Image (cartoon, rainbow, N blue to C red):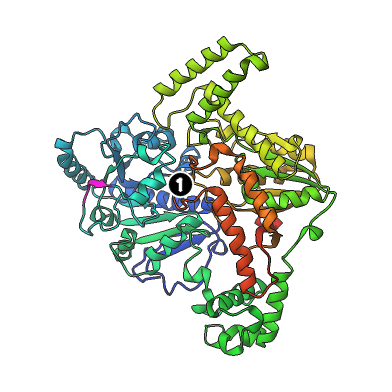
Amino acid sequence: MTDRAVETDLPYPETHILGGSTERERIRTVVAPEPDDIAVLVARRICQVIDRTVEERGLCVLGLATGSTPLGIYRELIRLYLAGEVDFSRVVTFNLDEYYPMSPESLHSYRRFMDENFFQYVNLPPDHVHLPDGTVSRVDLAGHCERYEQSIADAGGIDFQILGIGRSGHIGFNEPGSPRESRTRLVTLDTITRRDAASDFFGEGNVPVEAITMGIASILDAREIALVATGEHKAFIVRRAVEDEPSADVTASYLQRHPAVTAWLDRAAAGELTRIRTPWVLEEVEWTPEVTERATVWLAERTGKPLLKLAPADYRENHLGGLLARRGPAGQINGQVFNALNGKVRGKSKLVRHKKILVFSPHPDDDVISMGGVLRKLWENENEIVVAYMTSGNIAVFDHDVRRHLDFVERAAGDLELDAKQLRRARLRLEKDFASKEPGEPDSALAQNLKRYIRESEAVAAIAAVGLPRTAARFLDLPFYRTGEVRKRPIGEEDVELVLDLLKHVKPDLVFVAGDLSDPHGTHRMCKQAVDEALLRYRGTAPEVWLYRGAWQEWSITEADVLVPLSQEELREKVFAIFKHQSQKDVAPFPGGYDEREFWQRVRSRNLETAAAADRLGLPEYYAMEAYRVERPAETSD
């Protein structure tokens, strides 16, 4: 932590903030366990700034950002406003950026985003709100940008600026190569940025190629800056921004030169920071079994040796002399870690039998994508299995898939004794709806229902491919998802009650939940929230909870509590089950910008690599492996 860093009063107990040596961090960095923790911390800090600056000069100026990262902050600010803990009547806001061209009424407009997620819920005077204008003509664009800069200066400058960080390291839309002196201007968007935004626009081809953004110099003029990042997919670029030398390749690294900037990170986004990933290279650590396991596996990977062949010199020459002194000798450490890892491996004979199992799948394909192998083994072990699909997944179906299914039904109408004229009228109505719809706009109720049925039929076919009966499927269609848009409502009481009712009905001994929380729009995270809240209210015998991953990443061998080996045939059958989700095959609507591979390709690669990593450590050799984490009661969200 630099001595230039701004001091803030953290509104959480000190024990809630993850510590460790900050020796390599060039930006003051606060790490908390969960995204919601970060939202509370930043919102509380904003309230402190508002109170102080309004008292000092009668006005507070906030710089605001859009996207999924600040949503939790805005929700917490709304909650605090409704509770009477903050007043926005003397607050002026300036937003970072806007796509160009962009109508303020468009679903993709940042003006609409701010109205729907913040402005309409607080007492912020309308004339205090400023955003770049995506409708200004190109002739007037330079003047508009100059006037935007002047408006910031006339307001007295920005007191507190919220920033996210893009996968390319951009802040605002200041892409790699943006000059340090840049001001508000029109920019061309980087390919990575447009690819990451593709799911919002239902295709990369619909993403604008330009945007208006505050410049680096404009941002650095703010008196205090909060760089906010959540999720594992941000971890690598966060480390570069926080620990590496400032570089035009990562514009967020320019923040290192600001005297009052704080990076606010959840545990996942901080995962590549040295103090989180390898704290033993910075300082003496407490050598718990978990830390010992992580360090020893890291040493084996670093030296390219199997665990049982690590020598005392390997420990001493790689920052692990302290481990050797506290837990040695080397052979004893090697053996303990080897046995602990080997104990995680559970083939079919070590998995439960004759139990009730409830699998929660956020979308209608997450079950087979992430745990298609263990599903088959558990069914073969004569367990009762229910797979609950929490959302319809209907927004992830292309219009052409609906056309294809309707064409089949029309052709089969005679054999199925259906009214061909009614089918034709329905198809024509749908074609009219599709033709009048802009990219990203909600479908008609009919189209949404048809897309839901497509996903449901694919889900039934997929579980059948891993051996389960069609009757194992339950479709919850949780209300939070039913917006017809990419953006969803917060989890509500009805969502939790639907999950709770299913728990009461099934009375499971074992529950599987998606712990794969880096999906592009947070649906997995929200579904886990609904399950966590329902489990807290559940009065039956508490089930064991296993967290699975696969669509976006996999548990590492040290993170996992259970490793389930798969044969070549079992992995192939798992991939074939994923293929049953034909609407998600080849080009999925929401693949996630940070991995261009299809879901089956990601899964196959990760399952193979998990087994290969175990083999390199000297564990028994398997063809592939799925990894699971057992959630302890203390880890359950509250």
- Residue found at x 59% / y 80%: 305
The picture places residue 512, in percent across and down from the top left corner, at 70, 49
Residue type at mark 1 is Ile
The quadrant in which residue 631 appears is bottom right
- Relative to 529, does residue 285 appear above or below in the rendering? below
- Would residue 261 be found to the left or right of residue 457 on screen? left
Quarter of the picture holding the N terminus: bottom left
Name the residue at 39% across, 65% down: 240
* In this picture, residue 14 sits left or right of residue 2: right
- Residue at 55% across, 42% down: 523
Percent across and percent down for residue 462 are 66, 40
First to last magenta residue range: 183-188
Q: Mark 1 points at which residue?
A: 73
Q: Is residue 419 left or right of residue 193?
A: right
Magenta stretch, overall SS: strand
- Residue 95 in view (yes/no): no
Please give left or right for residue 226 compared with residue 495 in the image.
Answer: left
Asked if residue 298 is positioned above or below residue 626 in the image, the reply reads: below
| Image location of residue 99, percent across then percent down | 30, 40
For residue 436, say whether it is visible.
yes
Q: Quadrant of residue 186?
A: top left
Residue 357 in percent (x, y) is at: 77, 46
Q: Does the magenta stretch include residue 302?
A: no
- Quadrant of residue 130 within the rendered picture: top left
Q: What element carries label 1?
A: helix
Q: Residues within 10 Å of mark 1 (few under 14, many from 20)?
A: many
Residue 577 to residue 23: above or below:
above
